[in-house]
Image (cartoon, rainbow, N blue to C red):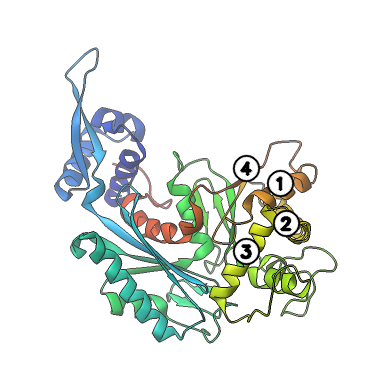
Amino acid sequence: MSAFNQAVVLDLVRRSEAGLSRVELIGATGLSTQTVSNIARRLLDLGLIRESGKVHVPQGKPRTTLTIDPSSRYAVGAHLDPSMLTFVLLDLAGTVVHRRHVPVEAVASPDETVARLASAIEELISETGIPRTLVLGVGIAAPGPIEFDQGAVVGPPMLTGWERVELRESLGKATGFNVFLDKDSTAAAHAELWVREKRSDQNFAFIYLGSGIGAAVVMNGEVVRGSSNNVGEIGHFSTGEGGRLCSCGRMGCLGVSVMPVQLVREAVTEGIIAGPVEDTDLLLITGRFRDLAALADAGDERADALFRAAGARLARAVEDVANLLDVDGIVFGGPSWSPVGSRYLEVLRAALSTRLAMGMIHEVELAGSVLGEDIAAVGAASIVLDHVLAPRSGGLLLE
């Protein structure tokens, strides 16, 4: 109870731009004056918050404002995407202090990848001059599925040879930090929660587009995980009749409908962009995907038609997600969203304007995330900070 109450107070202080006084915290939490005073003193002693000024009130003594101390602690976030390694360092307020991007030409072995991750993390921290002792830990976002309790990545479609890799333990040994592993789509949803003013009464789905596609679900301000922490494996959702042949043997699965490698392959076949392009050359695939999006933006009708067809198939899957979950909104993001987001949103809004079952009851907002391509890495670092800042739903505000 003590840890939960402390997390509640700390989270409220963090989310208040101007800070909160002890009196305001008592009113917001319902905790007693003594409990709030004890928690405030403990957080001050830990250096997590600071007294930042006085607020004069009509009656009584001026109130001391408590604010988060952003530079008191930090968290590293890493995103393992088959085509790019992304690293961010977040301060306690959730602001990106520093970032690094390491392009990946081809999928490396787990041992080589862990060594590369550990080296980049050390360089990230070293470049800022921040003492390692102030870093709370490392969060890593990886393609699913994962074994959450064991901290293992289990056969992601784009990571050839990664049948079962205990990434959390191996990276922990390589860096000396506590490591937290989560799916990239789940991490992205965490990041989206961090930039919102309130954690409560939030219901949305997050559609993550990277080298592959995944989803996450947020209900009442908390990420829904499922029995194995693998909610959101939507790559084999049906997008209707026809479509491309998937590795599972069916036609028109969502993954092959929107994956950059598939769209680039089709564009080369149709002569929209020059080839050949090796599927294993992930860095080249990423570049050609952006070239293809730039062509569409410049008015190339064939490139535009290719993306609009992909957007229409994405809309079929998004319709199923929205109707199943009855959420207030669908948020989109990830490295492969940025080049095509405006075009996809246009297609999605037109296609779903009359197709959602709850459309007569409430609006379902479709929007791109404001966090950009680094959202999974930011989310991974946010998961680390959540262990310090965020109250768990299983706790209660009790004396």
Per the image, the residue denoted by label 4 is: 328
Q: CA distance from mark 4 to mark 1?
A: 19 Å
Tag of residue 291: 3
Q: Is residue 64 left or right of residue 245?
A: left
Say which element carries label 4: loop
Q: CA distance from mark 1 to mark 2?
A: 9 Å
Per the image, the residue denoted by label 2 is: 311
Q: Amino acid at mark 2?
A: Gly
* Residue 321 at least partly seen: no
Rendered location of residue 210, percent (x, y): 57, 65
Q: CA distance from mark 2 to mark 4?
A: 21 Å
* Along the line of sight, the residue nearer the viewer: 165 or 283: 283
Count neighbours of disc 2 (C-alpha within 10 A) and say few if under 14, some if 14 to 19, many if 20 or more.
many
Q: Are the residues at dot 1 and dot 2 in contact (C-beta closer than 8 Å)? A: yes
Labels 3 and 4: the sequence-earlier one:
3
Labels 2 and 3: the sequence-earlier one:
3
Q: CA distance from mark 3 to mark 1?
A: 20 Å
Per the image, the residue denoted by label 1 is: 346
* Along the line of sight, the residue nearer the viewer: 282 or 46: 282
Does 129 sit above or below residue 177?
Answer: above
Rendered location of residue 69, percent (x, y): 23, 44
Say which element carries label 1: helix
Q: Quarter holding the C terminus?
A: top left
Say which element carries label 2: helix
Please identify, in this view, whether the residue under mark 2 or under mark 4 is nearer the observer.
2
Q: Is residue 289 left or right of residue 193?
A: right
Image quadrant of residue 198? top left
Q: Are the residues at dot 2 and dot 3 in contact (C-beta closer than 8 Å)? A: no
Question: Residue lying farthest left?
Answer: 45
